[in-house]
Image (cartoon, rainbow, N blue to C red):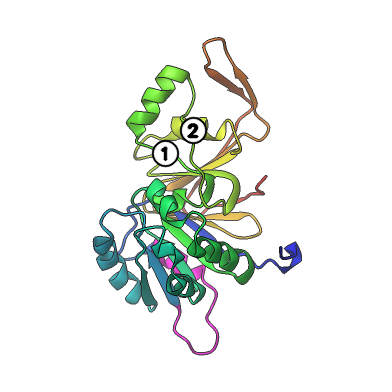
Amino acid sequence: MQDAALEHRGVLVAIGGNEEKTGQRRVLNAAIRAMEPPTGDDQPRVAVLTAASGEPERQWREYRPAFESLGLRVDWLDLRSHADAQDPRAAAMIAGAQLLFMTGGDQARLMSVLDGSACHRTILDRHRHHGLAIAGTSAGASVLGARMPGGTDETHEQFHALFGTAPPAPHGLALLKGAVIDQHFTERHRLARLLDLVSHGETSWGLGIDEDTAAVISPDGGISVVGKGAVTLIDCRNAHRSVGADSRVSLDGVAFHRAAAGAALQWRAP
């Protein structure tokens, strides 16, 4: 294990989905600004990972011209199985990029492809020790946390009605310790879902990110908001949780923060 003093963490950019791919592209530009410059005169490279999507070709057709028009060399990290993610050539593509961009789709599908693979190990090493910037939109944002929202909103509501709490949350890449990230936040009315998810287990804080909005998270804990919406931060580290006879959960002492585009938060993860 490398000494903590040798860490050189990259910036994380969690995007709420439906970001502009033409026009101003404020969110995509924020992801590019998070990159460290390549060595020498090399053109900056982004690896676009489409593993979350059931339509990877369509995602590639959308993001390739968007990033190329912003001056990047774009590589397609087309992983469709866990075996694909074990390929040394795929891991080398990640190692050669300054930005890893993960598209939307299904976060459980994305983790099933990456979990424990050579690409997974390369992502963690490059981000923690070599300054790799990682951006994810929608499902690609949720996978950045320690735990992820799972299933549909309807499934969550049915589970909550029966048991008074959230369904078990699957694990993510854990690039943000103790965190869960939800997306399409205001548009799909997901405050109750996120609050449930961060109120128990190994997650104690959460980010809810609106569409066409990004939370740009620096290694020192600063969070800046870019785009047209807002970011909601829920902090349950000091909350008191109690469970009633009907198995329903009560919470006291939850802290909420909401920051609109252009604002910043200073945050220290637990």
The three-letter code of the residue at mark 1 reads Gly
Q: Which residue was labeled with disc 1?
A: 150
The residue located at (57%, 44%) in the rendering is 179
- What residue is shown at x 38% (from left), y 49% (from top)? 109
User: First in sequence: mark 2 or mark 1?
Assistant: 1
Sort mark 2 into few (<14), some (14-19) or many (20+) by Cα contacts within 10 Å. some
Q: Mark 2: which amino acid? A: Pro
Left or right, residue 155 beside residue 116 = left
Residue where numbered disc 2 is placed = 168
Residue 254 percent across, percent down from the top left = 60, 30
Q: Quadrant of residue 188?
A: top left
**Residue at the location (59% across, 69% down)?**
131
Q: Position of residue 252 (x, y in %)?
A: 62, 23
- Quarter of the image with the N terminus in it: bottom right
Q: Quadrant of the C terminus?
A: top right
In this view, which residue lies farthest toward the top? 245
Residue closest to the far front? 83
Principal SS element in the magenta part? loop
Q: Is residue 10 visible?
A: no
For the magenta stretch, what is the residue range? 27-44
Q: Secondary structure at mark 1?
A: loop
Discs 2, 1 touching: Cβ within 8 Å: yes
